[in-house]
Image (spheres, rainbow, N blue to C red):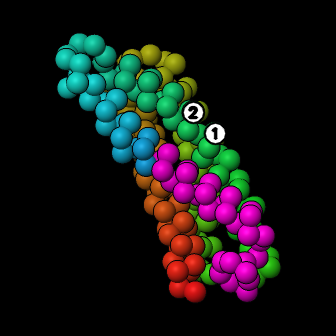
Amino acid sequence: MNGLGKDTCIPKHLWIIYLTLLGVTLGVAVCVGVFAAPVIFHADDLLGGGVLNHYQEGVIMTEIFVRSNYLITFTSIAVLLVEAYHFFVFCRDKITFFSAFAVVWMGLMFTLYYTPQIIEFQQMGESILKNELFQKTHFASELDYKLFVLSLAVLFVRYLYRKIER
């Protein structure tokens, strides 16, 4: 029992909601990472110099991530529940299993560890930008976010591929 449609492991209406959630979260994550971040961190190019400093740009970007984290957390929990159910009823394959594991792990690490850690650092003021621990944490959070997006894309595309394959 693997795949989509009539022989799916969950009811069709729930399956549609699940795939829509994966697609919407992927779209939001890409928009935040690919569109919002580069614009925010290059505000001087758009507005002229001296409007925002790098620290202020980071505070704005953090707020965007905080707001998108609600969706990321919700999606991570939904993936955990749906894919755990698939696992226990033998409705799975290796690609969806590992990509789902990565989505849950990376999504929750980003929302529950990295974002609060960055906020805590930011509360120390602008001088934190020169702190080596902050820089390493920020780099790790960027890597985590990229792996989350990649894993989510793999999970989503895998289900679409399986549907087309039928």
Residue at image x 36%, y 45%?
Answer: 34
For the magenta stretch, what is the residue range? 1-29
Task: State the image quarter where residue 45 is shown.
Answer: top left
Task: Find residue 1 and report its horizontal and vertical position in percent.
Answer: 73, 86
Q: How far apart are marks 2 and 1 (CA)?
A: 6 Å
- Residue 21 can be seen, yes or no: yes
Asked if marks 2 and 1 touch (Cβ < 8 Å), the reply is yes
- Residue 151 can be seen, yes or no: no
Q: What type is the residue that disc 1 sits on?
A: Tyr
The residue singled out by tag 1 in the image is: 70
The residue singled out by tag 2 in the image is: 67
**Secondary structure beneath disc 1?**
helix
104 shown above or below 109: below
88 shown above or below 128: below
Q: Is the magenta stretch mostly helix, strand or loop?
A: helix
* Viewer-nearest residue: 152 or 126: 152
Task: Find residue 114 and report its horizontal and vertical position in percent.
Answer: 54, 40
40 shown above or below 82: above
Task: Find residue 15 and report its horizontal and vertical position in percent.
Answer: 70, 66
Q: What type is the residue that disc 2 sits on?
A: Arg
